[in-house]
Image: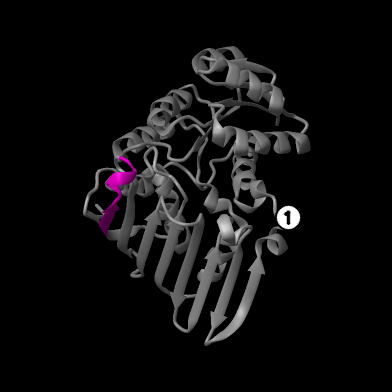
Amino acid sequence: MGIRVAIIGCGYIASACHGPACVRYAASHPDVELVACCDVDGERAERFRQEFGFARAYTDYLEMMWAERPGAVCLCVPPPLAAEMGVRVLELGVPLLAEKPPAMTAAEMDRLIEAARTTGTIHQVAFNRRFAPLLIRLRELLQEHTVRHVDHTFTRVGRSRGDFATTAIHAVDSLRYLLGCDFESARFGYHEYPSLGKGVADYIIDCTFSSGATGHLTVSPVAGTDAERIAVYAAEHTFVASLNWGVDAPGRLQHWHEGRPVLDLDAVQHCGTAEDLVVSGFYGEDEAFFDAVQAGRQPAHDFASARQSVEIMECLRERRREYTRA
């Protein structure tokens, strides 16, 4: 079955990730058409159209939806706009891939979940770490063990503008994905940097998961290097994943048992390429979505699976001190 693909939002994440992923998918699936792209900045939409070979460019997404009748939409808009626009797309019955975060609050997330349920529309949330090959492999390995503790360090350089919680949600969601369970509770601490700008802060999260495992997350937007490092501890086993950022790129997965190395797997070896589109999971998430649309089935990574990640993000944005799962 063919798909008419459209993209809403032609900014950085669309240009760096979803545009190239759409082009690659269409190249290997001749019945897939890249019919339209949309951005409120008409010049940016036209540049995107030319770069990635979409047929037409629009500045009004509803006009595009009615004119083009796409069979799948990638929504790549600023987070404050995502939920309202996502609901509108779902209400039109068009399969939706929503870039993270799909909503800014749990209440907005519930609107998306309800719209998807009542319309029965295929949808997927775009948390690319869920499709990063090294993390998929780590999740497979962890299923053979009882995880006792996980430690995640998530850092960026010079991110003193904007709301970093909408990026920090990746750290939260990655741990939920790896452990295959929700946060049971969490305590939050904040190291503020008022000299760097309003709202600039490190997030310190100590948590317990429903499995009984404990966790610690350190998130800093103004560190000395870009990095995402996850250490997982089970009885007599240690796993360390260094993801495709900064000095750790393109990434590595290591496993030790009783002091002896069991696995030392670099991303190029595992993926067959150092290409960011593949190593970081961006192509995998788009491919999974388009495959599901072609097959007429709902993907596993639905809006409900993202709800608690959005809840925790909301806690960070509001500088809450505690969270307990309802």
Image label count: 1
Q: Quadrant of the N terminus?
A: top right
Three-letter amino acid code of the residue under disc 1: Thr
Decide: is 76 above or below 289. above
User: Which stretch did the figure color magenta?
Assistant: 187-197
Percent coordinates x, y for residue 302 in the rendering = 47, 43
- Say which of 218 and 122 sits in front: 218
Q: Looking at the image, can residue 23 be seen? A: yes
Does 195 appear in magenta?
yes
**Quadrant housing residue 79:** top left
Percent coordinates x, y for residue 110 in the rendering = 33, 37
Residue at 31% over, 59% down: 205
Does 150 appear in magenta?
no
Residue at 38% over, 49% down: 309
Q: Which residue is the site of mark 1?
A: 273
- Callout 1 secondary element: loop
Classify 10 Å Cα crowding around label 1: few (below 14), some (14-19), many (20 and above).
few
Percent coordinates x, y for residue 61 in the rendering = 51, 18
Q: Looking at the image, can residue 35 be seen? A: no
Residue at 36% over, 70% down: 213
